[in-house]
Image: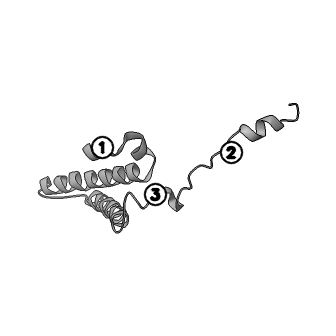
Amino acid sequence: MENGAVYNETTEPEAKPPRRPPFGCPLRRLPGWRLPGKAVQAVFSFVAVICEEIVEDCSNCSGLYFFEFTSCNAFFLSILILCVYCTDVYERLGEDKVEKL
């Protein structure tokens, strides 16, 4: 018993953690064109926010403010979707709760 031989036969081997894909985003949750589409959407909406901030003077700013609101919301929502689907948040919340959100 002192050499540990008794425990070697009954102990289960340690399970290896599941292997994460490169960049940490599993393609099974965002298959096909959805992952690149969301990434492109985030980039374009960020560029729209930057372009809106460049405008210094406008005569009728209501359209510009609406554009700022929609582009900023599109950026944050696309980043949120990428974070939910590409991290462990999806498993923690569960598929049914993610669909409700």
Q: CA distance from mark 1 to mark 3?
A: 20 Å
Residue tagged 2: 13
Amino acid type for the residue under numbered disc 2 = Pro
Q: Quadrant of residue 7?
A: top right
Nearest the viewer among 23 and 88 is 88
Sequence-first tag of 1 and 3: 3
Q: CA distance from mark 2 to mark 3?
A: 28 Å
- Outermost residue, right direction? 2
Q: Residue at x 31, y 64 (%)?
A: 44
Residue tagged 1: 96
Q: Quadrant of residue 54?
A: bottom left
Is label 1 or label 2 in front?
A: 2
Residue tagged 3: 25
Q: Position of residue 93 (x, y in %)?
A: 37, 40
Q: Residue at x 32, y 55 (%)?
A: 78
Tag 2: Cα neighbours inside 10 Å, few (<14), some, or many (≥20)?
few
**Mark 2–mark 3 CB contact (< 8 Å):** no
Amino acid type for the residue under numbered disc 1 = Asp
